[in-house]
Image (cartoon, rainbow, N blue to C red):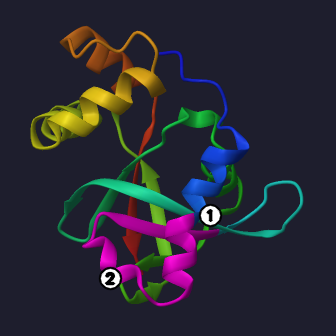
Amino acid sequence: MKTARRPSTLVKALFKVPVWMYQAHLGFLFFGSLIVIVHRGRKSGNRYVTGLEMIDRRDDELFVLSLWGAKSDWYRNIEANGVDELWDGTKRTGASFRVVASDEAFGILSKTEKAHKRLVRFFWPRMYPGYDFTDESRRALADSGVIVAFTAS
C-alpha cells in the first residue's frame, strides 16, 4: 500500500512535543498512548529519540503503527541497529522489537479501527492514500509490515 509523502518540517516539530515531554519526565501525561524509543542512525550512528503512538498493548508488548511505513527513518534505524531504550510513562528500559506478521497485524488494525473510529477515520486515509476501511484495504496495510511490537527488557 502506498504511504503519504514524507512529513513537513512543521509536522516533524509537532512530533517532537511528546519527546520533549518525556525528557521532562512528563510522559505519564499521555496516559499510556505514546511511547518513546531511543535508537542509533543506520549510517551516522547518531542517537535519535522518537515518539510513537501505540495502537495496542497486549501483555508485555506495545504495538505501534509506522505512519510512513517501512520508509520511516526510525523503522529503518531499528532494523539496522535495534532499540537502545524504550520509554513508557515513567519507565525507561532496554527493549527488543519484532515486525508483526500479516495475520496478526490484520487483527490489530481491525481492533484499532473499532476502538478509535474518529482518529482512524481522519488519519489513516491521509497516511495511506487509498485506504478505505474495507477488508482488502486492511489486508494490504497489514501485508506491508507497518506494525512493530516492542517488548521492554
Secondary element under disc 2, as helix, strand or loop, is helix
Three-letter amino acid code at the position of disc 1: Gly
Judging depth in this view, the residue of 61 and 69 nearest the camera is 69
What residue is rendered at 54% in x and 22% in y?
3
Up-down relation of residue 91 to residue 144 (above or below):
below
Q: Residue furthest right?
A: 44
Up-down relation of residue 103 to residue 55 (above or below):
above
x and y, in percent, of residue 72 in the image: 63, 41
Q: Quadrant of the C terminus?
A: bottom left
What residue is rendered at 27% in x and 34% in y?
120
x and y, in percent, of residue 74 in the image: 63, 53
Residue occupied by mark 2: 28
Residue 104 in view (yes/no): no
Judging depth in this view, the residue of 65 and 107 nearest the camera is 65
Q: What range is drawn magenta here?
A: 17-38
Magenta segment: does it hold 30? yes
Up-down relation of residue 21 to residue 49 (above or below):
below
Secondary element under disc 1, as helix, strand or loop, is loop
Judging depth in this view, the residue of 33 and 138 nearest the camera is 33
x and y, in percent, of residue 112 in the image: 19, 41
What residue is rendered at 64% in x and 34% in y?
71
Residue occupied by mark 1: 82
The image's mark for residue 93 is none
Left or right, residue 17 beside residue 153: right
Counting other residues with Cα less than 10 Å from the Cα at mark 1, is it few (<14), some (14-19), or many (20 or more)? many
